[in-house]
């Protein structure tokens, strides 16, 4: 098995755009529901808590935490979060109210467990990392405040989890963060992957000129990379609980603003796959993921997956110096056996399975054919044209792009692509 084949098997990457989860049901108001003054008091405590973190004031951070035995788990985790964030270059950390929780089936058990009046608030944690975040991004939390005498303390973040209010976990919830900065990179790792920080920072710096050479420079080229320690952390920070065994990385973004600014863009590496990637595989992986970062603002969620992944594979493979038949090993074996695909890959083909490498290789060669006919600038024009058309009518978007850029239709292009596969892989 070639090095590139290994990279494909371990590193088939997908683009995820995370959307805010729906808030937990608030239910009908009840006698136990908080009044506005109580909600304000808890928000005041959260404001102090955020200010203490930004000021690196451990005593002030601790003072807002409930010290009861019932809250000891949360309090201990919060102490660790403060320590874990010591090196993180935060420029923003604040809590913004979404809504108080008024569901008595949530409030009553929390009050009983904590032995006092409680307020549970659904808030958005807004945070930003220096350089890589052009504006704060937001994550959803459900936090519990408990009255102790005349003051309110923070006591839990999981009381609403059973009714849909599962608080987001960031990388700081999973261990100490180590920071590696470069001219265009911010790599966050834990001590177990300390040695990987410099490696991937260097790969980003070397791959960025390749990506900008194809896509252009109309994106934020300050890139954040997260390297989790475990599959649990990988799922938490990506918001994806699906089996991640075959994924070497995921590119996530929280939001694309109307002005095209992408918030919360991160490349998240899968720790289970890193050991299976050699130098060539890691270079392909980073080129692929950086292309997702660069193209995110232009990408429509309704456009075909083969084009999204094919462009990323095209850029990731640039400069590899390997014959096409070696890069597309699995597909080449099928074509030589007379199994030539009849159509471009469908979106459903990318959901997993043993033939996932072949679908990525098919997508790569479709984009390679477009670049051969229209140039790399033409490939980018095609991508943008399809993305724009897909917002209005996904079913005809590819046809629109083919007509505008290649002056052809889907039937003719598919036939040309099938012939191209045979020519390149036999």
Image (spheres, rainbow, N blue to C red):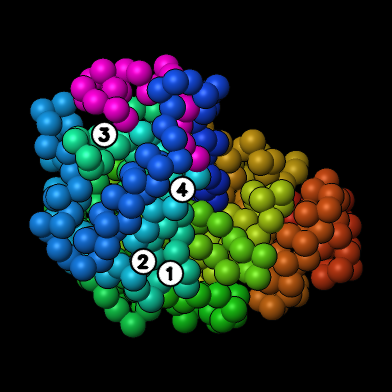
Badge nearest the viewer, 2 or 1: 2
Residue on which the image places disc 3: 146
Q: Which residues are magenta?
A: 99-118
Residue on which the image places disc 2: 92
Of the numbered discs in the image, which one, if any, rests on residue 34? Answer: none
Q: Which residue is nearer to you in this view: 323 or 355? A: 355
Residue under the image location 40 percent in, 22 percent down: 32
Helix, strand, or loop for circle 4? Answer: strand
Which of the marked residues, 2 or 4, is nearer the chain's N terminus? 2
Residue under the image location 38 percent in, 34 percent down: 120
Q: Which residue is nearer to you in this view: 390 or 323? A: 390
- Tag 2–tag 1 contact (CB < 8 Å): yes
Of the numbered discs in the image, which one, if any, rests on residue 97? Answer: 4
Badge nearest the viewer, 2 or 3: 3
**C-alpha gap between disc 2 and disc 4:** 16 Å
Q: Position of residue 20 (x, y in %)?
A: 53, 45
**C-alpha gap between disc 2 and disc 1:** 10 Å
């Amino acid at each position: 098995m070639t090095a590139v084949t290994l990279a494909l098997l371990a590193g088939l990457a997908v683009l995820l755009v995370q959307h805010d989860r729906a808030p937990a049901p608030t239910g009908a108001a009840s006698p136990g529901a908080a009044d506005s003054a109580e909600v304000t008091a808890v928000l005041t405590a959260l404001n102090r808590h955020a200010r203490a973190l930004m000021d690196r004031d451990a005593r002030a951070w601790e003072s807002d935490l409930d010290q009861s035995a019932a809250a000891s788990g949360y309090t201990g985790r919060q102490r660790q979060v403060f320590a874990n964030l010591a090196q993180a270059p935060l420029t923003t950390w604040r809590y913004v109210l979404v809504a108080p929780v008024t569901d008595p089936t949530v409030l009553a058990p929390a009050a009983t467990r904590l032995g006092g009046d409680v307020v549970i608030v659904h808030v958005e944690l807004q945070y930003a990392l220096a350089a890589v975040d052009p504006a704060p991004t937001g994550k959803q939390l459900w936090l519990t405040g408990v009255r102790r005498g005349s003051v309110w303390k923070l006591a839990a973040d999981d009381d609403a989890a059973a009714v849909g209010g599962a608080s987001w976990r960031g990388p700081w919830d999973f261990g100490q963060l180590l920071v590696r900065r470069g001219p265009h990179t911010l790599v966050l790792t834990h001590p177990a992957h300390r040695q990987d920080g410099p490696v991937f920072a260097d790969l980003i710096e070397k791959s960025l000129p390749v990506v900008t050479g194809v896509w252009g420079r109309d994106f934020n080229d300050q890139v954040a990379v997260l390297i989790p320690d475990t599959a649990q952390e990988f799922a938490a920070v990506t918001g994806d609980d699906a089996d991640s065994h075959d994924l070497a990385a995921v590119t996530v973004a929280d939001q694309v603003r109307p002005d095209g600014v992408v918030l919360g863009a991160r490349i998240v590496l899968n720790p289970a796959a890193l050991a299976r990637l050699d130098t060539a595989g890691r270079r392909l992986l980073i080129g692929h993921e950086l292309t997702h970062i660069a193209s995110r603002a232009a990408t429509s969620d309704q456009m075909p997956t083969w084009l999204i992944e094919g462009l990323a594979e095209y850029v990731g493979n640039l400069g590899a110096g390997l014959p096409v038949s070696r890069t597309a090993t699995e597909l080449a074996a099928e074509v030589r056996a007379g199994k030539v695909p009849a159509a471009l890959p469908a979106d459903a083909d990318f959901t997993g399975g043993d033939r996932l490498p072949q679908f990525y290789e098919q997508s790569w060669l479709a984009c390679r054919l477009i670049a051969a006919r229209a140039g790399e600038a033409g490939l980018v024009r095609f991508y943008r044209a399809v993305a724009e058309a897909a917002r209005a009518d996904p079913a005809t978007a590819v046809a629109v792009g083919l007509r505008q850029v290649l002056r052809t239709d889907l039937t003719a292009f598919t036939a040309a692509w099938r012939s191209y596969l045979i020519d390149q892989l036999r």
